[in-house]
Image (tube, rainbow, N blue to C red):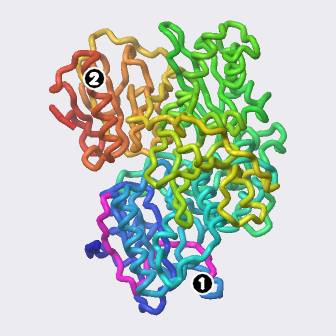
Amino acid sequence: MYQIEWAGMARNHFKPGTPDRIRMVVLHATAGSYPGDFNWLRQGGAPGREVSVHYYIRKRGQIFQLVADQDIAWHAGVSRWEVDGRTVYGCNDVSVGIELENRNDGRDPYPPEQYAAAVWLTRELVQKYRIPPSQVVRHLDIAPGRKTDPAGFPWQRFLAEVFAGLPDAPSLPPGEQLRQRMLDVAYRAAGSGLPSAWPFFTQARAFNLGMPVASLIARPPAPRPASAPNDRERALALPDGARYLVEVYARDALFAAVGPDDALRAGETINRLHAVPASPQRMALLEAIFRAADPVNGFQPGWAFHQYFLQHTDELGMPISHNHRLAFAPGLNFACQHFALDSLCSPVGQWQVIYRLSEIRRAAAGQTVLAGLSRERAAQLAQLLLDDLFALRTGRRYQPDAALIQYALGEELGAPLGQPEVAVIDGVPVALMPFALDVVACRLPAPDWPLDRPLPPASPFGRLTALLSGHRQLVTGVLRLSRIDGQRLPPLPATTAPLLGPARQSQPLIDVSLFAGDGEVRRRPIDTILLAPVPGPTSLQLVNAHIDARWHYYIDHTGTVFRLRHERYIARAARGVGLPAEHLDQRAVVIAVEGSLEHASPPLRSAVQALVQLLRRHFQIHLDRVRMIDYTSNPTLVENDKH
């Protein structure tokens, strides 16, 4: 049983109403973090962006009520939905809105405490106002194309748990439940969600483009104040003057023009990037697609990597990672960028030498010869690239003999796109994992079965195709979502190998210092670590990271560490903040941290502690020399900060 704390609104940004108006529940994500997003909502937003909402749920599971249920809050904006058999335009009048504290980037998790509170509150509202399943929706459902929240929320699981055991519980065949959960997993891995009857998905399926990779958004021109949410508006302005929605799939990107309200118009033509000739429009699309995967570098047409991409787009697919540095051997580093269907790498400084992961794996198997790589070195390099890919996309270690990895490589399903998840469908536990060209499923002996443990010999292993061709049974053979012919393939042979490699204990370090430039070399030894809380979002901060050369490291809210500059070069942390520049520039390693450390998530706090400890040991820095820069008000050094 949860307690609802009354907070109220500081401004009356709502209209009086009556309880009988309530026919919907709408879930949102704040695109911010507590307490900034909560205070912003409670104040009613900003001039020109007046907002309100009925409920706010913190990551810790606390539930605040800001507007009484019967009153009309301003949370849905321009929206449309079928309500009790009629189309409603402007869903505020018939709905209750729930905001979830979340950065809404598809990577920020919804902790179990918050998720459970959302299930409880929604279930209470559903029973109290007799709301059917079809009228519990996300913001992205009622404002498709315009909104993305709550990005990354486990929607199909949520609906099933809200209505479990209720008279109005959805009654779907197990196969259809499984199909919906698979699509939900695939779109959440891309940091998005799948609205009902979404035409981009229909088009992607028709052209066999694979799974979604990213749903592009327009970055704000400058960081918003930490107290105000950063709405993820989806429409991008291109050089032709029009505004477009852009979705990136494994094999290609789709885009369509939107109207003045940034909503997708009925019957609007959906275009493919492959069909766009060389033009400013194509260049702008490529820049946006690469910038989504690599905020630091974007698309660089003069780079050998990206020239190679233009010549081999069909084999590589769309980009899914930063261009970053990997340490292969003492004195030998590789530049690497992962794509949906393959990965590229080059020895640092030998930019015209480009290896593909698929070729390296063949060389390691003795099937081909690559200049400059012995068979042994090819095997080591393939392992390094796959370790990196799995760390970035799945949070797990690459284990070559793992059954699911062997299956995905053998079937050429492309890169893994997200972490495996477990769903219980009609009482049957199933592990789901999205890859670039499919979602793979495996029936588990129990819902809590460790995925780094071998399956019992009798457990079927599957890929899920037939569900799109009319089959509605929870089959036990091999099926794939991306194929629609209903073909059944045999399961894998029995194996004593685990299903997947073990989970990593921490997020990976992404070294994007490769193209930062040499900069000014230090003249004094490092004796200080400076922590600099910054508002984010990460993508916007990293765009300018190499330009201002202010930080050596950046840690985002998920705990991922980006290395921006080598420690041998100074970072200009003091520029523009009135602090003793000579001391900071010459002696300090500077770590930027997304958000407030006071309210940091456990992964972020753990990553900060681990990096600080590593740097302290390496440079022999005393704890008293770990300090904080306060950029938020009067720039100062906070002495002896022990965060």
- The image quadrant of residue 277 is top right
For the record, the magenta segment spans 60-82
**Amino acid found under the numbered disc labelled 1:** Val
Element carrying mark 2: helix
The foreground one among 575 and 573 is 573
**Gap in Å between the C-alphas at discs 2 and 1?**
60 Å
Left or right relative to 204: residue 229: left
Q: Are marks 2 and 1 in contact (CB under 8 Å)?
A: no
Q: For the residue carrying disc 2, how many other residues have a C-alpha within 10 Å: few (<14), some (14-19), or many (20+)?
A: many
Q: Is residue 426 visible?
A: yes
Element carrying mark 1: strand
Q: Is residue 262 visible?
A: no
Seen at 59% across and 24% down, the residue is 336
Seen at 62% across and 73% down, the residue is 172
214 in relation to 121, above or below: above
505 in relation to 176, above or below: above
The foreground one among 359 and 475 is 475
Residue that badge 1 annotates: 83
Residue 117 image point, x, y percent: 36, 67
The foreground one among 243 and 165 is 165
Q: Which mark is residue 212?
A: none
Seen at 65% across and 87% down, the residue is 86
Residue that badge 2 annotates: 584
Left or right relative to 269: residue 590: left
Seen at 47% across and 14% down, the residue is 518
Residue 138 image point, x, y percent: 53, 68
Residue 129 image point, x, y percent: 45, 87
